[in-house]
């Protein structure tokens, strides 16, 4: 823990805590990248401060016309310190229950969708083109 990372600008003051979603979890050699499983993990970080990235110079030039333009840019970033990573094994029972309830509800939805999508017998019989 206590690793300092540089991320795009975040709303918040220095010293405040922010919760970030997990993108990839590596736990004892097991790599988790499935979005359904990653929803159980939460990353808590503390905002250390705002910094600016390197200066980028852009120069536009067109030959034989006297056209010269110079432009500079510095991207703004926020430094955060990772304080904790929570989730994982404790949330597996909740996710399993959610998948089971979703599995029970899906046959009703599919049968209703099939009934709605099926054409009616008399609807096309009266129409001729």
Image (tube, rainbow, N blue to C red):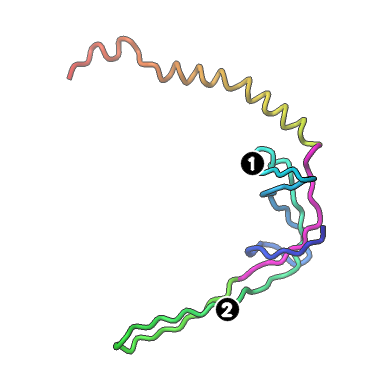
Residue 95 occupies quadrant: top right
Residue 55 occupies quadrant: bottom right
Residue 48 in the magenta stretch? The answer is no
Side of 92 where 128 appears, left or right: left
Outermost left residue: 129
Side of 129 where 119 appears, left or right: right
Overall secondary structure of the magenta stretch?
Answer: strand
Residue 84 in the magenta stretch? The answer is yes
Residue 121 location (% of width, % of height) = 32, 10
Q: Residue at x 47, y 79 (%)?
A: 58
Rendered position, 25 above or below 92: below
Residue 90 location (% of width, % of height) = 81, 36
Toward the viewer: 28 or 97?
28
Q: Where residue 65 is drawn, which disc sits there? A: none
In which quadrant will I find the C terminus?
A: top left
In which quadrant will I find the N terminus?
A: bottom right
- Magenta stretch, residue numbers: 76-89
- For disc 2, the neighbor class at 10 Å (few under 14, some 14 to 19, many from 20) is few
Q: Where residue 55 is drawn, which disc sits there? A: 2
Residue 48 location (% of width, % of height) = 76, 67
Q: Determine the CA span between mark 2 and mark 1.
A: 36 Å
Residue 122 location (% of width, % of height) = 30, 10
Per the image, the residue denoted by label 1 is 35
Q: Residue at x 64, y 68 (%)?
A: 77
Q: Residue at x 39, y 16 (%)?
A: 118
Toward the viewer: 122 or 104?
104
- For disc 1, the neighbor class at 10 Å (few under 14, some 14 to 19, many from 20) is few
Q: Residue at x 71, y 66 (%)?
A: 79
Rendered position, 47 above or below 64: above
Upstream in sequence: badge 2 or badge 1: 1
Side of 83 where 5 appears, left or right: left
């Amino acid at each position: 823990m206590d690793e300092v990372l540089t991320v795009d600008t975040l709303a918040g003051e220095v010293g405040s805590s922010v919760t970030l979603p997990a993108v990839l979890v590596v736990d004892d050699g097991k790599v988790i990248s499935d979005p359904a499983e990653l929803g159980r993990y939460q990353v808590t970080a503390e905002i250390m401060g705002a910094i600016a990235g390197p200066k980028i110079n852009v120069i536009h030039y067109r030959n034989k016309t006297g056209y010269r333009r110079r432009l500079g840019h510095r991207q703004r970033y926020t430094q955060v310190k990772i304080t904790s990573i929570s989730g994982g094994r404790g949330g597996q029972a909740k996710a399993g229950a959610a998948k089971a309830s979703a599995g029970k509800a899906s046959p009703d939805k599919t049968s209703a969708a099939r009934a709605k999508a099926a054409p009616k017998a008399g609807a096309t019989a009266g129409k001729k083109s």
